Each structure stands twice: as C-alpha cells, then as structure tokens.
Image (tube, rainbow, N blue to C red):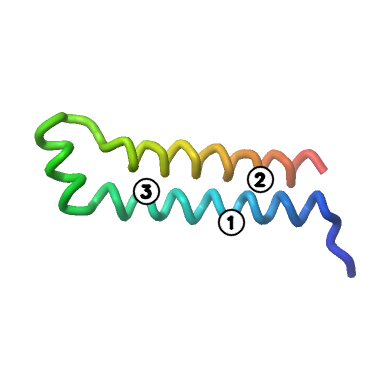
Amino acid sequence: MAISKGNLIAVVLLVVGVVLLVLGFQEHGAFASKITRALGNRPSNEVLAYFVGGGVCALAGVFKLIKK
C-alpha cells in the first residue's frame, strides 16, 4: 500500500505542528517565561512563535488530510 505524496506532506505538517505546540507549552511553563509574564503580563515572543507556528502547521496538515 503506497502513501501518496500529498498525504505524506499532510502527516508531516501535522506532526511538526503538534511538536511545536508541545514545545510551546513546555516553554510557557519555564522559569524564564514565568518571570517574563510576571513583569510584562504577556508571554514571550518565543512562546508565541511556537504556538502560532504549531497551530498553523497542525491546521494545515488536518485540512490537507480532510480535503483529500
């Protein structure tokens, strides 16, 4: 059973998105991030980049799998 190139790309996007989201949650709970949030009352740019990048990749992967 062969996997099409489109499905492979969709699965890779989904996996990368989930990994980025997990890294974002880990970074969000880090000590330096807690200090940044305490002083500035917002998450660091790195955490936001992980969340946005992970969300975009995961959604793109899901939509590509569904659209098939």
Quickly name the residue at label 3: 24
Query: Would residue 37 be found to the left or right of residue 58 on screen?
Result: left
Instruction: Identify the element where label 1 is drawn.
Output: helix
Image quarter for residue 59? top right
Circle 3 packing at 10 Å, graded few (<14), some (14-19), many (20+), is: many
Q: Position of residue 4 (x, y in %)?
A: 86, 56
Percent x, y for residue 35?
A: 12, 43
Using the image, determine if residue 4 lies above or below residue 42: below
Q: Pointer 2 and pointer 1: residues touching (CB < 8 Å)?
A: yes
What is the x, y in percent for residue 51? Answer: 42, 41
- Quarter of the image with the C terminus is top right
**Side of 57 relative to 47 (left or right):** right
For the image shown, how many numbered marks are present on the structure? 3
**Which residue is depicted at the point 16% across and 30% down?**
41
Dot 2: few (<14), some (14–19), or many (≥20) neighbours within 10 Å?
many
Q: CA distance from mark 3 to mark 2?
A: 18 Å
Q: Which mark is residue 15?
A: 1
On the picture, is 10 further left or further right than 15?
right
Q: CA distance from mark 1 to mark 3?
A: 14 Å
Q: Residue at x 55, y 37 (%)?
A: 56
Mark 3 or mark 2: whose residue is earlier in sequence: 3
Disc 2 marks which residue?
61
How far is disc 2 from disc 1 in space, using C-alphas? 8 Å
Residue at 49% from the left image edge and 40% from the top image edge = 53
Q: Position of residue 44 (x, y in %)?
A: 27, 37
Which quadrant would the N terminus be assigned to in this image? bottom right
Q: Is residue 4 above or below residue 67?
A: below
Residue 64 lies in what quarter of the image? top right
Which amino acid type is marked by label 2? Gly
Q: Earlier in the sequence, mark 1 or mark 3?
A: 1
